Amino acid sequence: MNNQKAILYLIFLIMTSCAEQKEEPIVVYSYVEEPHSYAKPNNAFIEHLNLDITVDFKNERIRGTATYDIVSNNSTQIILDSKHLEIDSVTADGKDTEFSLGANDKLLGQPLTITIDKNTKKIAITYKTTKDTEALQWLKPQQTADKTNPFLFTQGQAILTRTWIPIQDSPQIRISYEARVKVPKGLMAVMSAENPKTKSDDGLYQFQMKQAIPSYLIALAVGDFEYKAISDRTGVYAEKSMLNRVYEEFSDMENMVSAAERLYGTYAWEQFDVIVLPPSFPFGGMENPRLTFATPTVIAGDKSLTSLVAHELAHSWSGNLVTNATWNDFWINEGFTVYFEMRIMEALYGKERADMLALISRQDLDDELDNLKDTPNATKLKLNLKGKNPDDGMNSIAYDKGYLFLRTLEETVGRDKFDAFLKHYFKEHAFSSMTTEKFIPYLSTNLLEKNKVNFNVDEWINQPGVPKNQAIINSDRFKNVEQTLQEFLASDKINNEVTTDWTPQEWVHFIRNFPQTMTDDQMKTLDKIFNLTNSTNSYIQMVWYEQALNHDYHGKNIDSKIQEFLVSVGRRWYVETIFKAFKRNDRTEDALKIYEKSRPNYHSVTASTIDDLLGFEPDQEEVKNIE
Ligand SMILES: [Zn+2]
């Protein structure tokens, strides 16, 4: 379905009293008010992008031309979002046209207003990125796995695509795209589109994304990597030294796609590949359609952290197919995705494993509710992020409260009915956007009233905290873990046979539940028996290092291990957790010393979070460039 068809619109005919005048249809598009974009899509919107760019590693710039097919509602201008871009020239249907860049907002950037007439079909913008461009991370060979070639990746979500392409950067505006990307010879380029499987001889790559997607899902990675197919429609990209490990780790991907399709309908994007990026990638994964971007920290060697792939795959329905209309509706993307992720994990690995993941989600939610206890409005599913960075809403509320809401609904109406509802929801709203306000009556009509069920939907969505009617999540395996911990605390002894078949999730549960009264000797004992400080599982490392800071534990050279971890890994969740522990335990000075070394390795998304957390001021030069 193309963009226009996907948009619900009303046509009002203006009937004039004068018979000689022509009847002019005025189309009123139903884009909703969007606090994080300057675009006025009800007047004029973009429909298709043809991107022609050169990736210049030497100067760390992308330059080229973005040509758009546009639809204008008799408008004399079209407004795009732009941030830290140099705009060289703009044409409308091939002729130079006037354009202006408005005042710069630190968060939103500048509106790029382009003069058009009511017949304009195409606009073309020739531009360059600058060194302040936040979406791009340029990595030196040293920062990659193979250490021989530079690497570039983009991160568009939430409002960063406008920092590498001038665009209407709102999740409710969908476009198809094609691209011609020139990179240095010997490197490969991939996008959220139909991708090459081998390198080109001349460094030139062509891409096509036929389905209409929101701008935050346009993505590009350039580096020295290779492809290995898992099945006809799944496979992995990684640097040479990692390719086989990545392939083994993700070898269940085809089974995951099949399991997901059995749940909620046909996979709409044909190909599902994953590219493993260098460790500075700020997220666990990013659900760029056809090609998920992933952190190497999930390559644990035992498939124990692959729920991340299930999560990104689930986004192929919730998020990529049915998209939150604004960032205030972020739970529409993430709550559904966590729910779907759990269902995929259950289908593939059984209820026991899914229960553990669900209980971890429940505990993450409790921690977040505690973090946000002074700002209860931030614990509503429907947010109000006007004037704030949409990243502020990317916390456990959207993910884990959203999940708990949907799981409670499932348990209330029964799984079969809930599954039928979800399948229909995805099908009916495919390739369109969803607001919370539109979802509520849809849910009432199609699930609750139909099944004569009373449910406090408004309390879940528009009130702070978690309502009393909530699914109770239990895990027998976690109960055993808790018992093992209690026995250890009482006796200082632990039988390591009990722990031999523990998954990292059980280890995480064990470690996270250390009481404040845990002694240094007890920490030492555990470290001696299980060598936790030198764990190679990033998830266990994160929680163990956090507890080491909470308990002022310094054994086994752990301080240098923590530093090494923070300098090499840029995954925001991990580094934020550890830096928070430094701060909580009055060691902000130590944290700042490490941060000075680690910050150059972080993507802007991670750096801006940690800057705020530690009160770090980037040096004058950088400040000047940001303003
Ligand atoms: Zn997600």
Image (spheres, rainbow, N blue to C red):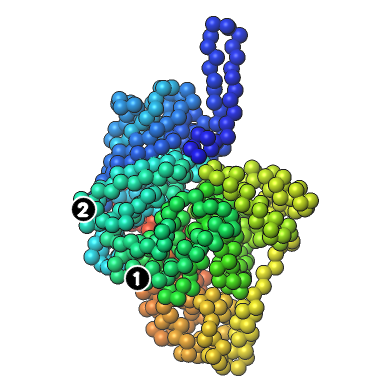
Mark 2 Cβ inside 8 Å of ligand 1:
no
Measuring 41% from the left and 86% from the top, which residue is drawn there? 556
Residue at numbered disc 1 = 244
Image: 32 above or below 564: above
Residue 45, given in percent of the width and then of the height, sits at 46, 33
Left or right: residue 199 compared with residue 373: left
- How crowded pointer 2 is (Cα within 10 Å; few <14, some 14-19, many 20+) is rated as few
Residue at numbered disc 2 = 201
Left or right: residue 482 compared with residue 607: right
Measuring 39% from the left and 61% from the top, which residue is drawn there? 235
User: Is residue 168 something that shows in the picture?
Assistant: yes
**Which amino acid lies under the numbered mark 1 shown in the image of this protein?**
Asn
Image: 310 above or below 451: below
Return the mark for residue 205: none
**Which amino acid lies under the numbered mark 2 shown in the image of this protein?**
Asp
User: Is residue 566 something that shows in the picture?
Assistant: no
**Does label 1 or label 2 sit earlier along the sequence?**
2
Q: Nearer the viewer, residue 465 or 317?
A: 317
Residue 524, given in percent of the width and then of the height, sits at 48, 88
